[in-house]
Amino acid sequence: MGAQPIDRFLSITGAEPIARARRLGEEMSSRLTGRAVWSVNSTAIGGGVAEMLRSVLPYVRGFGIDSRWVVIGGTSDFFRITKRLHHALHGSYGDGSPLSVDERAVYENVLRANADEISALVRPRDVVVLHDPQTAGLAPTLSGLGAIVIWRCHIGADIPNPETDLGWNFLAPYICDAAATVFTRQQYVPDVCNHDRSTIIPPSIDPFSPKNQHLEDDVARAILLHTGLVGGDPSEALPTFVRLDGSPGRVDRRVDVIGLGPVPSLDAPLVVQVSRWDPLKDPAGVMRGFARLAEMEPHLDAELILAGPNVHAIEDDPESAKTLDGVVDRWRALPHAIRDRVHLASLPTADLEENGAIVNALQREATVVVQKSVREGFGLTVTEAMWKRRAVLASAVGGIQDQITNNVNGLLLEDPNDLESFASLLGRLLSDAALRQQLGEQARERVRTEYVPLRHLAQYAELLERIDAA
C-alpha cells in the first residue's frame, strides 16, 4: 500500500475542494514532521475498518506523512470476548456470555503482549489511532509513552439499553485515557466518554480502489463469468482491473457458490447483499424476505446472491463460520423452487484487491442491492453500491439512516424484521426501472459530496490541529 496524490479527485470534486485538501495536508505534514501516525486494528482482511484503512492511508502518505498500519494478534478467547463486545455496543445480546473479571483478564493479557511489541516502535508525540473494542485496551500504555492516542469506534446504538451499558462499562477504563474519541454518529457517543473530547467523523470510500473503480459493463460481466457467479457464453472481454499502485490486475480465482441449480444467467435480475457472515447483517432474513416476495409476486424472475468473505480468512470474527452454517441450514429449509433462485457465495480473500474487483463487478451487475441489517454502525457496502448508481434497499438502522434519504437516494426499511414490508419494497424496485435509475443517480451524487476521502481527511486534520493546540 503506497502513496496516492489527492489530485486524482479533481475529476470528482472540482478544483476548490482539492485546493483546500492540499492546504490542510501540507499543514498536517508540517505539524507531523518527524512523527509517525499509527493505525491499529485487529484484522487486515474483511470488515469495514480494514477496508477504510486501505482506502484512506495512501492519501495520507501522499502528503508526505509517515503513516503506518499495525494489526494486533489475539487468542480465540480474546476474539470471542471482543465479538461479544461488538454485539453489546450495538445493543445486541450476542452469545450472552459474561463480560466480567475473567473476561477482562483475558482481554488485558492479550493486549499487554501486543502493547509490548508496539511500544518498541511508538515514540513520544506519535499519533496512534486505535480502532474499535479490540484495541481499546492499548490506550493507557501508549498514552503513558507520550503518544497522542485517538480511539476510533465504528459501532454503536442509537438508543442505550442494558447491553450497551455492559459494553461501555467494560471499555470505560481504557478509552478515558485517549486524547480524543471518534464516533460515526453523535448518538453513539456514550456517557462514559468525555463529550468535549469526542468528535463525529463518518467513514468514506475510495472511488479509485479495485472495489469502487469504474468497470466497463463487459469487464464486470467477464469477472462474474470467470468466478462462476453467473453463467453464460464466454466473454471476449478480460476479467481485469487496476490495482491500487496503478498496475494491471486480473481476477484468477473462482467463487465458492452453494446453490441448488445453475447460477443466474447474465440477463437475470439480481438481488445482491454483500457483507460479512454476521447475524447482525441478517442474511437469513434476506432469504426469508426474498422467499416471501416470490410468493407474493411469482411472475418476478429475480435471483438472490448472498455474498461474503471466506469465513476462514477473518481471524477476529469467530462467529462467521457458525453464521454461514446457519444460513446454509435455513437455505436447505426453503421450498425447492425458491432454493433454486438463492445462491450463497463465499468470495476468495487471498488477494484483497482481486476480492474488491469481484465485489465491484457483483454490485455493478445487481439490479437491486440490499442491506437488511438489524444493527449497523455505518454501511460501507451501502455507500459502495450508491457510488455505482445502484438502487439500494436498506434497513433504517444506525449510520444507514444518515446515508440514505428515503425515496430520494434509496429506500429505507423502517423495521428490519418486517418481512412483508421488505418483500413489498423489493418488489417495487424490481418492477420499476425508472425508479431504480432515479434513486441510483441521486445515490451517486450523495456519495460524491459526502463520502469520499477528501472530507474524511479534512476532518482528521482539523482534529489533530485541535489536539496539538490543547
Image: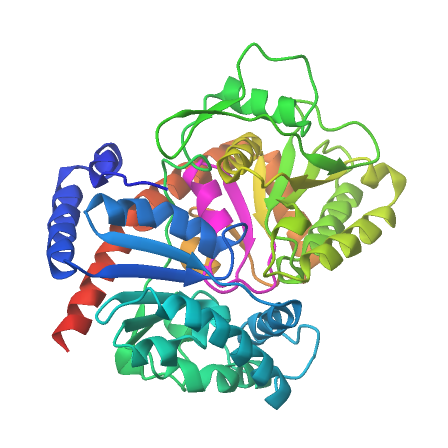
User: In the shown orientation, is residue 431 left or right of residue 389?
Assistant: right
Residue 338, horizontal then vertical, whole percent:
82, 40
> Magenta segment, which residues?
372-399
Q: How is the image coloured?
A: rainbow
Residue 66, horizontal then vertical, whole percent:
24, 53
Query: Which residue is outermost to the front?
Result: 120
Q: Nearer the viewer, residue 421 or 351?
A: 351
Q: Is residue 106 visible?
A: yes
Q: Quadrant of residue 305?
A: top right
Q: Is residue 195 magenta?
A: no
Q: Is residue 157 visible?
A: no
Residue 414, horizontal then vertical, whole percent:
57, 62
When the figure is inspected, residue 8 is found, relative to residue 175, above or below; the finding is above
Image quarter where the C terminus lies is: bottom left
Query: Which residue is outermost to the bottom?
Result: 101
User: In the shown orientation, is residue 26 left or right of residue 440?
Assistant: left
User: In the shown orientation, is residue 298 left or right of residue 14?
Assistant: right
Q: Nearer the viewer, residue 395 or 331?
A: 331
Image quarter where the N terminus lies is: top left
Residue 71, horizontal then vertical, whole percent:
46, 58
Q: Is residue 381 magenta?
A: yes
User: Residue at horizontal 70%, vertical 22%?
Assistant: 231
Q: Quadrant of residue 358?
A: top right
When the figure is inspected, residue 93 is found, relative to residue 66, above or below; the finding is below
When the figure is inspected, residue 343 is found, relative to residue 69, above or below; the finding is above
User: Residue at horizontal 12%, vertical 74%?
Assistant: 469
User: Residue at horizontal 16%, vertical 60%?
Assistant: 32
Q: Nearer the viewer, residue 289 or 63?
A: 63
User: Residue at horizontal 62%, vertical 40%?
Assistant: 272
When the figure is inspected, residue 412 is found, relative to residue 354, above or below; the finding is below
